[in-house]
Amino acid sequence: MTTHQLPKILEAVLAGYILPQRGHHGVVHWARVMENGLRIAESNGADTELVTLFALFHDSRRANEQIDNGHGQRGGDFARTLRGSLVHLDDQRFELLYEACRLHTDGLTEADPTLQACWDADRLDLGRVGITPQASRLCTDAARRLISWADNRAIACHAPTEILSTWGFDP
């Protein structure tokens, strides 16, 4: 995946996204998840392309801002519809992406390092909805070291302008 594909992927995601783009589960959240995930990947060796795609797809098919069972699977299913056109992953890597999306709200901590990076990246952004991330619920030491930094950014609704610009989204 090249960075020039990211605006096209975001455009496809937003074409069917029914919640506010700047809402609790919207584009700025996705950018912080990517930023968190890439920091974790530096430490645990996670697949950075999958971390990036997870950030874009994990909440992409939410139906509401509260409890929405099955939204992760719907996000993974949507990613599957873009396979071969905008998402170019072999079967094994795509299944990792799918599982990262499908299981991201299940509270799991034991998994492949890429799944762990994805799940922790999302959990580190819980401050945006008034929940402080708990070290015991994170998968990686890297995420535990990032709690304060990531939580402060989530609470402040920090918009990672470099990522958003790369995606073609006006911060």
Image (tube, grey):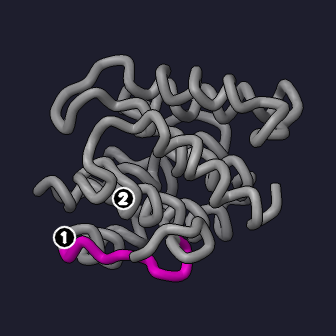
Residue type indicated by callout 1: Ile
Q: How many marks?
A: 2
Amino acid type, label 2: His
**Residue 129 point in image, percent of width and height:** 15, 53
> Residue 169 at x, y = what percent?
49, 68
Q: Is residue 12 left or right of residue 108?
A: right
Instruction: Tell whether position 5 is magenta.
Output: no
Residue 66 lies, in percent from the top left, at 16, 34
Of labels 1 and 2, the one closer to you: 2
Predominant secondary structure, magenta span: loop
Q: CA distance from mark 1 to mark 2?
A: 11 Å
Q: Is residue 121 visible?
A: yes
x and y, in percent, of residue 85 in the image? 81, 36
- Residue for badge 2: 29
Q: Residue at x 23, y 52 (%)?
A: 24
**Other residues around mark 2 within 10 Å, as few (<14) / some (14–19) / many (≥20):** many
On screen, residue 15 above or below 45:
above
First to last magenta residue range: 156-163
Tag 2 secondary structure:
helix
Residue at the farthest left position:
130
Up/down of 150 relative to 11, above or below: below
Figure check: 79 above or below 117 = above
Q: Is residue 10 left or right of residue 135?
A: right
Label placed on residue 111: none
Name the mark on residue 155: 1
Q: Residue at x 66, y 46 (%)?
A: 113
Q: Residue at x 52, y 42 (%)?
A: 13
